[in-house]
Image (cartoon, rainbow, N blue to C red):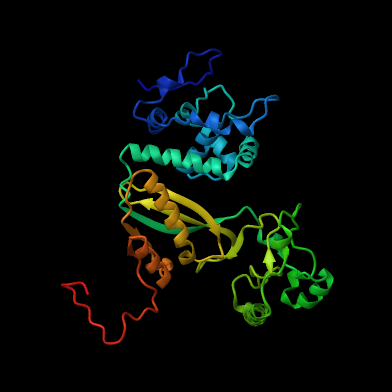
Amino acid sequence: MQGKKQYQEKLFSNFQLSERVPEDNFYRRLNKVLDLDYLYTLTKGYYGSSGQKSIDPVVFFKLYLVGYLENIISDRKLITHCSMRLDILFFLGYDIDEELPWHSTISRTRQLFPETIFEEVFTKVFELCVSAGMVSGHTQAIDSAPVKANASMDSLELKVPEEELEAHLRKVRHISNRDKDKPFREAKTNKATKVQQTLSAHQKELQAISSRNNKWSKEQNGRPGAGNKGARYTSNKTHYSPTDPDARISVKPGKAVKINYLSQLTVDTNQHVITDIKAYHADGKDNQQLPDIVKRVKRRLWNAGLLWENCIADTGYSSGDNYAFLEKNQLKSFIPPHGTYKGGPEGFTHIQSGNY
């Protein structure tokens, strides 16, 4: 006989979340090994002694962990996603009839804690991975990726020198039609410091920018999006973002120009555990960041009692100074040289058997 399911909500029901989440579920297993209770002591100084209770700091960091694991960067989408998943609710310690924190609460709490708190949490989780035997420390792979900043290209403003603003603007009107008046989308508040608003490029750099702009103006009819009346040439030397002054204009081949940060990620090759991550200015190059990355990773591995021997990275990290730096730190570098590298000195012959 054919069955037909009829749904009718019950006024009362007997339901336990723990019975619905399988024992082998990822978040249930993670909940057993991840102890974040130390956060109560670590973050206590950032809360007052009276007023409405805040979001539980453990819940806050668990939400961020879920966001990373589920690849969700929007606070609003994260809360919606978590409310629909029984296993995540169980991981967070919420029942099905409990409201999750409001998405704006997540944003405000993120602004409450300094960078050191997030660094401490990362280190604690890293130590748990080391204790579980997931990190060997022997070989570390380094790579970078642009991370879009929470800022719009339309809100970019011109940097000004330390002379009168109007006098300077009269000189640079030719840079772009978009820069003649106010920004296309003016920021509500300008968060940039006086230094960040001040023009730092010297005269030679400005002349080079002007030349590129003239060339760009002549060729722009053949460029994608050239018909857009808002098309303009932008540079970190001449423009800044008032909403996110630390972000920088950058572009990858074949991609649109955006305001980004540059994320540098280091991974242990044993079980692909992240051993270090940090955001840098997007106008910097990978090889400029390598020494700082190595110092950070080496310190963290040393504190965990691990010895780092091999460093793997792509060509973007290659430079003579970096090779010398890695050798000085007793690290074997597996970084291919830049394409313009021509090999050893003239007449040099490599004896493979003796490696000399």
Count up the numbered dots.
0
* Location of residue 101 by image quarter: top right
Q: Nearer the viewer, residue 310 or 246?
A: 310
Residue placed at 71% from the left, 57% from the top? Answer: 192
Q: Where residue 36 sits: x, y (%)?
A: 47, 31
Q: Where residue 340 sits: x, y (%)?
A: 40, 79
Does the image show residue 59? no
* Location of residue 156 by image quarter: bottom right
Residue placed at 69% from the left, 54% from the top? Answer: 243
Vertical side of 28 occupied by 127: above or below: below
Residue placed at 26% from the left, 83% from the top? Answer: 348
* Location of residue 258 by image quarter: bottom right
Q: Could you tell me which quadrant the C terminus lies in? A: bottom left
Q: Where residue 26 sits: x, y (%)?
A: 38, 33
Q: Where residue 264 sits: x, y (%)?
A: 47, 56
Residue placed at 63% from the left, 40% from the top? Answer: 107
Which residue lies most toward the left here?
A: 353
